[in-house]
Amino acid sequence: MIVEYRVLGPLEVLVDGDVVTVPAGRGRVLLATLLLRANEFVSVDELVDRVWDGEPPAPDRAHKSLQTVVMRLRQALGPANCVRTSARGYTAEVDPERLDLTRFRRLTAQGEHRAALELWRGPVLADVPSEALRRDDVPRLVEERAVALERRFDEELTGPTDRLVPELRELTEQHPFREVFWAQLVLALHRADRQAEALAAYDEIRARLADDLGVDPGRRLREAHDEISRSGSSAAVPRQLPLTHSRFVGRERELARLSEALRSRRDQPVLISAINGVGGVGKTSLAVHWAHRVAHHFPDGQIYVNLRGFDSRAEPVRPLAAISRILPAFGVPVGDLRADALVSYYRSVLAERKVLLLLDNARDADQVRPLLPGGTSNLVLITSRNQLRGLVAREGARPVALDVLDERGGLDLLTSRIGAERIAAEPEAAARLVVQCAGLPLALSIVAARAATDDSLTGLADELALEGLDALDVDDFTGVRAVFSWSLRSLSEDAAHLFVLLGLHPGPDFAAAAAASLAALPLPRTRKLLGELVAGSLVDTGSDGRFALHDLVRDFAAERAAALPAASRAEAVRRMFDHYLHTSHAAWRLLQFNAAPVVTTPPAPGVLVEPVPDADVAWARFEAEYRVLLSAVDRASDLGEDDFAWKTMFTLHDYLSRQGHIHDAATGHRLGLAAAERLGDMNAQSLMHRRLASTQISFDDFAASEFHLREAIRCAQPGGDVPAEAHLRRGLAFAYEKQGRFADAFQVLAEIHPRMADHPDPYESGRHLAALGRAHHKVGQSDRALELCTLAAEKFAESGFNGQDAGPAGNLETLGEIYLHLGRHAEAFASYERAVAVWRQMRAMTDVADCLILQGEALIEVGEPVRARECLIEALTIAESLLDRENFEDQVQRARDLLASLDQI
């Protein structure tokens, strides 16, 4: 007799191919619940809660009522009955090969994604009437299927792609924000020579992400777009200039001087340093407007970089970081980590092109100098509050000093905003307004925004006079502050209050949801108020849907916020911190597997926690917010918000490490550890020591890493958490292995093996066995290593791994090494390829590069130079692109040496 159980679709039980009728209602819920946890005991209390969907019978009847449901289910199943009873509850005792769910997980773990997906027959458990199942279990299964689909398409995108397009279009409709499906659709269209449709699909998801989520496309989408660019599409030319103001007026003399400099250059790039002047004088507006005028002279692209030289809430952008953002726009990797080599590579790349480079808000000449490109066909346009005299003297920069507007220019600006009729009707009042604003465009723009809805210019001028502002001193922030204060009073009460609260935000920018949490307002209401602030020229908005304040405006808002009652200020800051912590925690949970939550308390009333439906959105959240989160941690440390500081850094670690932002991680983790120590929380200290140990390994500082790992073990011991101690010992073993101390690595894992050998959690058991197997391999016991790592793979498969943790990928790498050592080459390469696929799924590009190098070495060893070169070129490209963020010099050199060895073959 062959019995089969199916949950990947309608609930079905078959005996020798014939369908067995399962009782409707509670009997189906009971069987579905048990099959989803096949061969595990489920407690009576949990089953009662599930079967009665949160509305159980009276306590004195609950157990008896459940027994009745079980009895009827057993009778209906007959020879297919799998329900077993024990003192711990009930279980469905089934052969894993007879349940479609366990077969699906085994096949996906083996990389057989098409076969695994063929087991799905429709919406999972669609005929089981249980809100609890649909809330708690179905989403996880849907995510597992989506991941399997992603991996299947990744495999099939290497062949003919036209046939994939209909299915991918359907999937993007079902999962409108799942970026991997969109990226795969873009690639399928592109590789099918349907370039226009590919670019249209990319533009559609980019707009959707910006409008609905306020984020930019993630890595997979950007890489798909880059592939189109490299193929010769017109999209290969970066067009990064911000929009010019549609009512830009005046500045004819400065525009003429800029144009004359461009015409008169002789075989040298034109360096225009100062568009220099005080804050708010219109430097960026002038630069952007003129850059749009001359963009056609630079057909290879226009690049815009805000260097944030005078941002009071953010550090100035480092030159190497700016280069790492510029080069990918041309589809080329970043060069060597050493500053001189990186800058030379950058200059060589731009020397081959005709590019306009706008460097906005530069701090000083030292920040700008490494960004000056090579060649004679490029133009560099720089804005700064400083005159950058060093560039004028040494590099021949042509300064263009920008003063405030004269009366005519000021009147032209007002005219462009409110119309000539208004100016003609009250010319004296208009002239007074220009004088009162001292011709400062920022102040005039704010006055014009108010005048657009006010009947009388004379009345506005009189109001400013009451502020004591007869003539603004542009070198004194007091005068500008008076304009801001006057403008603030023209807003609605709620908009003004929101503006003041924004002075509590750490910057550099924010999404509407963060503002809603600050003010404890619904999101639609907040968006309306932000629109009022944008209309009043107090808040700027970008094409990405995020918001920012001019640095002078931000300083004014911070001053006003400091005057709020301490209790109100503290409540708003707490809501803002809760918004960021709970949203980042939700994103972190989706990028992890088997991770216990660190945030267990609900957010404060009024906090908006943004939805994070899948791993792609989680990644996009971190990409959009990680700079804000780092700034918030710094602010929290100053305010004594220690719980926020350590928990936020804990959740941010995986994103920072996978993206190679290890300097940011190290700085933030030190703040997190200090916060945990102030709290006296031993568990938090252990977790932060663990994070710091990981970053120190990335720096090859093994002494510091070992110190933090031993401190983490010491802090964890009072809790007696064996898996936590095992995790830390794995870190210690890894540090020892990196130093070649293989016997020490083996010993530190062998010591805990008796306590972990029979651990009931298959995932934790798998991680321990994988590390111990690797240690055996490194001390020359490869047969025992293979046995342990194979068992670890089985444990990972049993756990239902979701593709978001390093344990299974690292185990596949180890299996590749073991198989290679044993001469089992086909199995070695299969293991390496599956490891690379998991690392890609995790977006852990440093690990992708490492594994590709291992694979390349193995291919060289067995005499396959063509495949080896492909692996090593990709590894080198990835490694070079991460140099500015990650201590990756050794990997770069290793890949180059291996490629050089191939040239000798």
Image (spheres, rainbow, N blue to C red):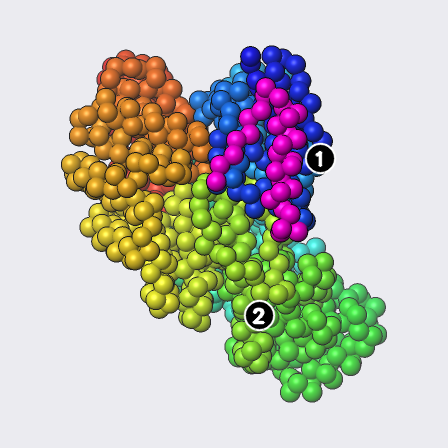
- Residue shown at 53% from the left, 67% from the top: 574
What whole-number distance in Å separates the C-alpha atoms at marks 2 and 1? 48 Å
Which residue type carries mark 1?
Gly
Do the numbered discs 2 and 1 sit on residues whose CB atoms are within 8 Å?
no
Tell me if 9 is positioned left or right of 46 in this view. Answer: right
Position of residue 416 measured from the top left corner of the image (x, y, whole percent)? 74, 63
Residue 243 at x, y percent in the picture: 63, 51
Quadrant holding the N terminus: top right
| Residue shown at the point (73%, 81%) measured from the top left | 461
Q: For the point 69% across and 23% down, which residue is it? A: 21
- Mark 2 and mark 1 lie on one chain; the one further toward the N terminus is 1
Question: Quarter of the image holding residue 681?
Answer: bottom left
Q: Quadrant of the C terminus?
A: top left
User: For this view, does 212 lie left or right of residue 875?
Assistant: right
Please say whether residue 225 is visible from this viewpoint. Answer: no
Q: Residue at x 54, y 18 (%)?
A: 115
Under circle 1, the secondary element is loop
- Circle 1 sits on which residue? 25
Task: Locate residue 666, reporting x and y percent.
Answer: 34, 54
- SS class, disc 2: helix
The number of callouts visible is: 2
- Main SS of the magenta part reads helix
Q: Which residues are magenta?
A: 58-87
Q: Nearer the viewer, residue 52 or 127?
A: 52
Tell me the residue that label 2 is attached to: 572
**Does residue 340 sit above or below 638 in this rendering?**
above
Question: Can I make out residue 890 in this image?
Answer: yes
Residue type marked 2: Ala
Looking at the image, which is closer to me, 738 or 606? 606
Q: Which mark is residue 46?
A: none
Whether residue 422 is situated above or below residue 32 in the rendered picture: below
Q: Where does the image place residue 856, in percent across and percent down from the top left?
A: 31, 23
